[in-house]
C-alpha cells in the first residue's frame, strides 16, 4: 500500500523520508521538494501528477539515483542510495532501476537489439546469454521482428517499446517512467500503457510514473499529486478531470 | 572487447568527419615516416660506422690526396691492425643523374677492414683475378639491372675517358643500414691508366685493435705526419660520417621541428573532432550513465574512440610510408640507404597512440564529469 505520511511500514520496497531538494538559480533559492515522504510496496504502480515545475521529474531523478537530494533519505530494498558514492550508485542503477523517458532516448547508431543489449554489457553475461535476454525482452514488447531495425526505422510507439525492453532486460527492481506517453498519439500511448499495466499485473513490476495525462494516470493503482514540494493523494474525480 | 562494436558504431556516426580525421593523421604519419627515413638515410653512415675504424685524410681537404707510402708507415704504428685505402673515382654511368659512389680500392686489405660487406668467396676471387673487375652493392646492381659478367662503361669525370669494368661480385650489407650502393674496382687499374695523381690515394681507413685507443692512435697519426708535405687529419669513421651529414645542415633538428609542428597540428585536429563528437553526444552520454555506465566506463569509451581513430590513421600512414620506402631511393642515388626501420615504425605508432590519448583526454574527462540531470536536460 502506498503511503505518504512518513510512518514506518515494514514491507516498503521504496522508502523516502524528509526529502528536500533546493536549487539555486542566480540569487534565487527554489525549494522544489520540501520534506517529502513516500512508501511504495513491491508490485505497485504509482503515478505522479502535478503542474509543470512542481518537481515531478526531480523526484523521479532522486528515486533513480540520478541526482542527490539537499537532505533526506531514499532507501530501496534496504539500500540507502542517498549515501552511496557515484561509482556505487551507477552499479546500483544498473542492477535495480529501469528508466523509460518521454523522448525514448535510444542510441541512434545502435539497432533495437543493440539498444536493448546496452545495460547487459555491464553484467557478466556471455554473448549468447545476452542475446537470449535481449530476444526475450523484445519479444515481450512485441518487437521480436524488429531487432535489426535502427531507431530511425521505427515509429514513435515502437521506439518507446524498445526503450521499455531496454528498461526491463536486466529485470530491475522497479521502473521509473518520465512521461512515457508524452510524445505519442493516443493509440500508441494506449499500447504503451497496456504494456506497462501488463508488466505490473503479469510480471509484478513496481512502476513509478510521472505523467500529465489523466488517462495514463488512470492505469496506476495510486495517483499522487505533487503540490508545493509535498505529495498529496489525488481524489479519483480529480484524476479523471 | 564487448564495447568494441559500440565504439566502432560511434566512430562512424559522422563518417565524413571520422574519415577526414583518420586521413589527416595518416598523412601526418606518412610525412613522419618519410622524414625519419630521410634522416636515417642521411645519418646512415654515422649509425653503422665502425667504432674501431679511423679515417685518415689530407689535412687541407678531403679532395686532396695522400701518398701511397703512408700505408706501410700506418701499419707499423702501435694499435693499428690494418690500413687500407680508397680513391674517389667520380665517373658517370650513362647520365649524370645515375649517381652512385665509386671507389678504387686496395684489393688486398679492403675486405679485412670492411667485413660487413658480404659476398660469396668465389665472386671475390673472380674480382681479384680480373684487373678490370668490379664489385657492386646490391642496391646499385638492382637499380641498373646489372648481373655478374656484365660489362659496364663509365665516363670518367676526374680522369676523363671511357672506363670499362666487368661486374665480378655483388655485395650485401650484413646490417640493415649498410650502404649497398657502392662500386669498387682495382686501385691498380686506376693507377695504370690515370695520367696524373699517380702514387697517391684518396684517404686511408685504419683499423685499431681496440676502440678505446682511437683517440690516442688518431693523435699519433697526425703527429707522425705533421710538418710534412702531406699532413693528415684523422678522426673516427663516425665523426667523419657525421661531418659529411652536417654539410647539408642540422637534419635532426629540422626533422624534430617539422615533427613537432605535425604533432601539434594533429593534436588540434583530433582533439577538435573528439570534442565535437562528445558535444553532440551529451544526451546519449547522459543516457549511458542513467543505465548504469560508470564515469570511468564513459571516460574509457570516449578515450578508446579517440585512440582507435588515431591508431587506424597512424597505421595507415606508417604503412603507406613503409610501402613508399620499399620502392627504394627516390632521389636516384642521393639517399642510398633508404628504408623505414621497424623501430621507427613502432615509434610512429607510439606517436599516434600519444595523439589519441592526448586529443581524447579532455573530451573524455568532460564526458566523465557530465552530470546526468544536466545531460538529459539537453535532449
Image: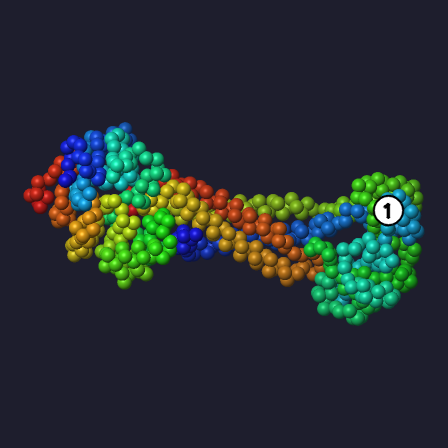
Say left or right for A123 vs B173: left
Q: Position of residue B56 (x, y in %)?
A: 84, 47
Tell me the residue at 28%/44% (across/down). A96
User: Which chain does tag 1 point to?
Assistant: B
Image quadrant where residue A90 sits: top left
Say above or below: B263 vs A148.
above
Q: Position of residue A77 (x, y in %)?
A: 25, 39
Closer to us: B99 or B368 = B368
Tell me the residue at 17%/32% (across/down). A8
- Tell me the SS state at disc 1: strand
Q: Quadrant of the N terminus of chain A?
A: top left
Closer to us: B349 or A91 = A91
Say above or below: B273 vs B139.
above
Q: Position of residue B315 (x, y in %)?
A: 53, 55
Say left or right for B136 vs B310: right
Closer to us: A3 or A187 = A3
Q: Is residue B35 visible?
A: no
Crowd class of label 1 (few under 14; some 14 to 19; many from 20; radius 10 Å): many
Closer to us: A196 or A22 = A196
Callout count: 1
Tell me the residue at 32%/39% (across/down). A89
Q: Is residue B299 visible?
A: yes
Say left or right for B353 vs A118: right
Residue at label 1? B80
Say left or right for B230 vs B41: right
Q: Position of residue B237 (x, y in %)?
A: 78, 48
Q: Quadrant of the C terminus of chain A?
A: top left
Amino acid at each position: 500500500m502506498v503511503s505518504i505520511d512518513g510512518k514506518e511500514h515494514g514491507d516498503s520496497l521504496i522508502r523516502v523520508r524528509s526529502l528536500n531538494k533546493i536549487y539555486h538559480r542566480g540569487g534565487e533559492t527554489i525549494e522544489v521538494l520540501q520534506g517529502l515522504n513516500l512508501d511504495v510496496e513491491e508490485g505497485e504502480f504509482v503515478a505522479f501528477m502535478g503542474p509543470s515545475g512542481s518537481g515531478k521529474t526531480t523526484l523521479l531523478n532522486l528515486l533513480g539515483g540520478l541526482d542527490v537530494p539537499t537532505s533526506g533519505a531514499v532507501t530501496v530494498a534496504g539500500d540507502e542510495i542517498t549515501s552511496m558514492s557515484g561509482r556505487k550508485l551507477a552499479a546500483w542503477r544498473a542492477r535495480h532501476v529501469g528508466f523509460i523517458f518521454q523522448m525514448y532516448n535510444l542510441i541512434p547508431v545502435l539497432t533495437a537489439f543493440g539498444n536493448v543489449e546496452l545495460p547487459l554489457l555491464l553484467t557478466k553475461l556471455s554473448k549468447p546469454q545476452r542475446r537470449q535476454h535481449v530476444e526475450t525482452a523484445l519479444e515481450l514488447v512485441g518487437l521480436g521482428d524488429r531487432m535489426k531495425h535502427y531507431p530511425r526505422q521505427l515509429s514513435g510507439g515502437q521506439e518507446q517499446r524498445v526503450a521499455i525492453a531496454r528498461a526491463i532486460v536486466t529485470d530491475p527492481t522497479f521502473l521509473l517512467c518520465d512521461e512515457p506517453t508524452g510524445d505519442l498519439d493516443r493509440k500508441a500511448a494506449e499500447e504503451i500503457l497496456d504494456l506497462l499495466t501488463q508488466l505490473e499485473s503479469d510480471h509484478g513490476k513496481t512502476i513509478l510514473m510521472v505523467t500529465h495525462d489523466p488517462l495514463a494516470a488512470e492505469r496506476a493503482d495510486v495517483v499522487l499529486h505533487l503540490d508545493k514540494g509535498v505529495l498529496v493523494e489525488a481524489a479519483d474525480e480529480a484524476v479523471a478531470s | 572487447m564487448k564495447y568494441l562494436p559500440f565504439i566502432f558504431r560511434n566512430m562512424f556516426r559522422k563518417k565524413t568527419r571520422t574519415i577526414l580525421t583518420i586521413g589527416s593523421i595518416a598523412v601526418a604519419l606518412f610525412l613522419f615516416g618519410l622524414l625519419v627515413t630521410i634522416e636515417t638515410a642521411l645519418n646512415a653512415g654515422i649509425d653503422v660506422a665502425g667504432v674501431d675504424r679511423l679515417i685518415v685524410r689530407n689535412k687541407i681537404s678531403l679532395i686532396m690526396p695522400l701518398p701511397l707510402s703512408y700505408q706501410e708507415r700506418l701499419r707499423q704504428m702501435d694499435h693499428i691492425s690494418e690500413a687500407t685505402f680508397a680513391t674517389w673515382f667520380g665517373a658517370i654511368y650513362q647520365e649524370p643523374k645515375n649517381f652512385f659512389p665509386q671507389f678504387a680500392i686496395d684489393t688486398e686489405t679492403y675486405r679485412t677492414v670492411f667485413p660487413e660487406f658480404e659476398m660469396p668467396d668465389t665472386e671475390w676471387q673472380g674480382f681479384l683475378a680480373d684487373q678490370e673487375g668490379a664489385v657492386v652493392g646490391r642496391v646499385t646492381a638492382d637499380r641498373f639491372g646489372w648481373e655478374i659478367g656484365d660489362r659496364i662503361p663509365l665516363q670518367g669525370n676526374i680522369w676523363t675517358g671511357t672506363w670499362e669494368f666487368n661486374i665480378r661480385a655483388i655485395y650485401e650489407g650484413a646490417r640493415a643500414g649498410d650502404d649497398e650502393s657502392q662500386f669498387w674496382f682495382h686501385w691498380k687499374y686506376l693507377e695504370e691508366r690515370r695520367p696524373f695523381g699517380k702514387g697517391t690515394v684518396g684517404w686511408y681507413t685504419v683499423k685499431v685493435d681496440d676502440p678505446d685507443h682511437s683517440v690516442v692512435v688518431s693523435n699519433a697519426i697526425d703527429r707522425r705526419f705533421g710538418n710534412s708535405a702531406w699532413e693528415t687529419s684523422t678522426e673516427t669513421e663516425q665523426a667523419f660520417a657525421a661531418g659529411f651529414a652536417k654539410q647539408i645542415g642540422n637534419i635532426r633538428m629540422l626533422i624534430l621541428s617539422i615533427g613537432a609542428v605535425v604533432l601539434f597540428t594533429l593534436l588540434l585536429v583530433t582533439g577538435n573532432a573528439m570534442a565535437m563528437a562528445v558535444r553532440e553526444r551529451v544526451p546519449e552520454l547522459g543516457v549511458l550513465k542513467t543505465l548504469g555506465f560508470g564515469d570511468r566506463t564513459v571516460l574509457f569509451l570516449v578515450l578508446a574512440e579517440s585512440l582507435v581513430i588515431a591508431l587506424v590513421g597512424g597505421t595507415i600512414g606508417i604503412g603507406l610510408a613503409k610501402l613508399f620506402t620499399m620502392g627504394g631511393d627516390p632521389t636516384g642515388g642521393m639517399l642510398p640507404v633508404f628504408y623505414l626501420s621497424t623501430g621507427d615504425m613502432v615509434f610512429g605508432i607510439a606517436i599516434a597512440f600519444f595523439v589519441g590519448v592526448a586529443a581524447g583526454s579532455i573530451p573524455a574527462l568532460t564526458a566523465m564529469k557530465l552530470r546526468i540531470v544536466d545531460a538529459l536536460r539537453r535532449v
